[in-house]
Amino acid sequence: DAKTTQPTSMDCAEGRAANLPCNHSTISGNEYVYWYRQIHSQGPQYIIHGLKNNETNEMASLIITEDRKSSTLILPHATLRDTAVYYCIVRPLDSWGKLQFGAGTQVVVTP
Amino acid sequence: GAVVSQHPSRVICKSGTSVKIECRSLDFQATTMFWYRQFPKQSLMLMATSNEGSKATYEQGVEKDKFLINHASLTLSTLTVTSAHPEDSSFYICSVETGNALATDTQYFGPGTRLTVL
């Protein structure tokens, strides 16, 4: 049973910001939101995670709504190398490392 | 973050043979590693949790006698696909958990191993 819902695919123009939505309406109070991406034929790459506050690192920003039922991953200046499948994952406190990957969003950055 | 390597990156074998895949944590001592499998155009599915010095924990539907996991040290876990068949052809990926497997920890993945069974 999927805990997150993401669009199947998105196109983004190179140099523009890419905003990737994720719905997680059944999230619990102690569950974190994680984002990973997977470039074709590679292992997933950790991007960012958060609980309720917005987070930013060198790769992206994570905006979580006040009710925590949805979040948006923002790639501020998309490049062709950002073309990948992006996974939004809700991680329970007692997950013991088990990450449940959904189908993710296929992001294609075009010149 | 942790750097994880896998060897080999790709392997082709004949049906009935066994294949060993290594997963190494290069800069982090990992008491727990994870093995995932990914079929073409599908998402990652957790196969098993590898625990250093103890038996692995397998997910439902994963045959423990077919997918042998050995986590002999804090930096190495191996997955052996025994008597491989074409339906075992897949992308196998390992990961390392940097922490105590809590929700606040981060998991880092290896580059994956492409297995093709002829």
Image: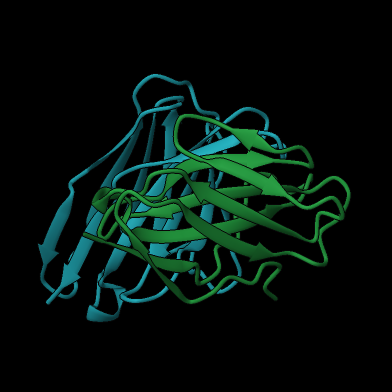
Chain colours: A green, B cyan
Residue B82 appears in view: no
Q: Quick check: A46 above or below A87?
A: above
**Residue B7 appears in which quarter of the rendering?**
top left
What x and y, as percent, mark residue B114? 22, 60
Q: Residue at x 33, y 58 (%)?
A: B92
Q: Residue at x 21, y 59 (%)?
A: A111
In screen coordinates, is B99 left or right of B113?
right
In screen coordinates, is B51 left or right of A65?
left
Which residue is situated farthest in the bottom direction here?
B87
> For the image shown, how many numbered marks are present on the structure?
0
Q: Residue at x 43, y 53 (%)?
A: A37
Q: Residue at x 63, y 27 (%)?
A: B99
Q: Quadrant of the C terminus of chain B?
A: bottom left
What x and y, as percent, mark residue B66? 39, 66
Residue B109 appears in view: yes
Using the image as rendered, state which of residue B32 and residue B108 is in the foreground. B108
Q: Quick check: A12 above or below B50?
A: below
What x and y, as percent, mark residue B35? 45, 52
